[in-house]
Amino acid sequence: MLKGYWAKIGVNTTVNVVPQDKFITNALLGDAGFYLYGWRQHAGLYVDAQNFWWNSSASIPDGKGLSLNFARINDPVVDENLAIARSNSDEAKRKAAAEEVNKQMAKMCYQIPTSWTLWGTPHSPKVMGLGSSPLPDGSEANDGAGFSGQFWVNTLWIKS
């Protein structure tokens, strides 16, 4: 499917099937054959969840060790705003910092998302409490700590 999309805009491509374990190892080591744009690594509802993927401190040069910063992003603007977004107690400042990270990522074109995943939690109608994890203050915890495709099981029950 993607090969056809690229062909429509004049880009010649080849399909290179890589087993998942090798694909992950290539990403961690910065192998030249790693295809970053097919990678789905950015789950979560808040930019703070991206800190270990995008922070310069997680960027190890290719071939020099394991790096969770697969794109080897080394950007002081991204680092500064990730720090603000994860540590400032002012919600407006955290949001502004997250927006700055987004702008810088787009400006520098570090990663080009070419697809996204639609998540669902198929279940029997008898399963109750899915998506309901109340916190002491009365608010609800985000399913799976805000990561797509995950949910808390501590509030699940079966309706008889």
Image (cartoon, helix red, strand yellow):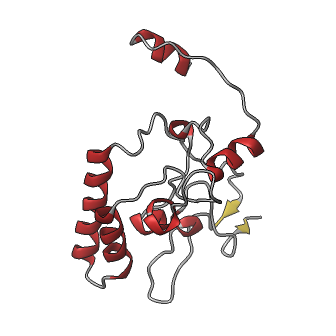
The residue located at (31%, 65%) in the rendering is: 76
The residue located at (31%, 82%) in the rendering is: 88
Say which of 153 and 38 sits in front.
38
The picture quadrant where one finds residue 101 is bottom left
On the image, the x and y values in percent for residue 3 come to 54, 17
In the figure, 24 relative to 56: above or below? above
Say which of 1 and 129 sits in front.
1
Say which of 111 and 140 sits in front.
111
In the figure, 15 relative to 114: above or below? above
The picture quadrant where one finds residue 60 is bottom right
On the image, the x and y values in percent for residue 45 come to 44, 62
The residue located at (46%, 34%) in the rendering is: 114
User: Would residue 141 be found to the left or right of residue 130 on screen?
Assistant: left
In the figure, 6 relative to 27: above or below? above
Q: Quadrant of the N terminus?
A: top right
On the image, the x and y values in percent for residue 66 come to 65, 59
User: Would residue 145 be found to the left or right of residue 9 on screen?
Assistant: right
User: Would residue 128 be found to the left or right of residue 43 on screen?
Assistant: right
In the figure, 81 relative to 31: above or below? below
Q: Quadrant of the C terminus?
A: bottom right
Residue found at the far front of this picture: 64
